Amino acid sequence: MGNVNVRMQKNKDALSGFQIAKLTFDFNTFFDLNKDGYLSYKDFQWAKDKVCFMSGWKIDSEKYRRTEKLFSDIWISLLEIGDMDNDGRITIVEWLQLWERYKKELCYKERGTENFLQKFYTDKNPDFRLLKMTGEKLGDDPINLMKKGPNLVDDLDTILPSWLHEYLVFRFDLLDRTGDGRIDTEEYEYVLSEFGIRERDARQAFLIFTQNSLEPLSFERFVNLFEEYYLSDNPSDLGNFVNGVLEFKFDNIQEEPLIQEEPLIQEEPLIQEEPLIQEEPLIQDEPLNNEHKI
């Protein structure tokens, strides 16, 4: 596959065309399930019903109730951070703006690492792997994170935000049809075909990111691949194939910041104040006429 040079971006904080293409595909394929152009709670209800139906979990079962709560919690968390206009739904623009904020956060966190300036001038994409090693995490307040319980905190060995980690738990369980903690190619092809991915493409993508099935697809590996999918700007990273797509077309996507910064307010020039009471002009004395001699 070879090494691919990443294009230098004008704006380090902006999403690249490649990242926009990946995130748009993810939004349209795996989140907007009813295809109405935006995310709402209906999409998460649909996802819950889909996974429960495919897994054979009945409405009154414990697994059904747990899955229902999981999707409700994910939606509430996503709505709090992604619904910028508070209309109860998330558009594709708001989705991309959310990920641009995450990228800005990565750039901000990276400024505190060693050799930042050297890296800044050689690679415009933040090194999320290095930040992950230092324990950084996107979009989470550590105090609020601890309130969610010890089990969740123990499982968060990822830089991805917690709502997305919880969503990936669902995605992995959906793919792991036998429940053995490993996803094989038959399971992967079958489930992705339910989302409109061609089985041939899914099979080839699986061979790529598992390196010809030599690397088992455990949950830990699954999360690592999605870290690359959501955060990497390098098309050669294996995680870019985890959604079953072999190539993303992004040549015509303009790399412009989605979040517009407020322009600086320029001070208006001071208005020269004029006196309210106009002074009467001085009356000049007319020159005296010379008197004529008699």
Image (spheres, rainbow, N blue to C red):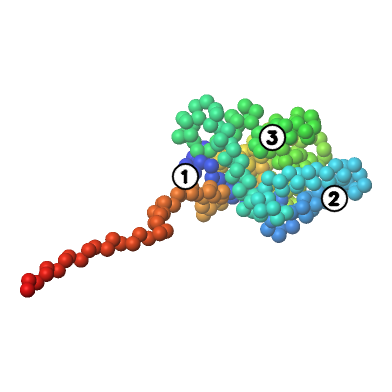
- Number of marks drawn: 3
Say which residue appears at 92% left-offset and 47% top-offset.
Answer: 60
Residue 53 is marked as 2
Classed neighbour count for the residue bearing mark 2: other residues with Cα under 10 Å, few (<14), some (14–19), many (≥20): few
Q: Nearer the viewer, mark 3 or mark 1?
A: 3
The answer, for residue 50, to whether it is visible in the render is no
Location of residue 64 (image quadrant): top right
Say which residue appears at 9% left-offset and 72% top-offset.
Answer: 292
Residue 106, position in %: x, y? Answer: 58, 36
Question: The residue under label 2 is which amino acid type?
Answer: Phe
Residue position marked by numbered label 1 in the rendering:
10
Say which residue appears at 72% left-offset and 38% top-offset.
Answer: 162
**Marks 3/1: CA distance?**
31 Å
Residue 52, position in %: x, y? Answer: 84, 48
Asked if the residue under mark 1 is in contact with the one under mark 2, i.e. CB atoms within 8 Å, the reply is no
Residue 110, position in %: x, y? Answer: 55, 32
Name the foreground residue: 189 vs 102.
102
The answer, for residue 272, to whether it is visible in the render is yes
Q: Nearer the viewer, mark 2 or mark 1?
A: 1
**Marks 3/2: CA distance?**
35 Å
Badge 3 element: loop
Residue 245 is marked as none
Labels 3 and 2: the sequence-earlier one = 2
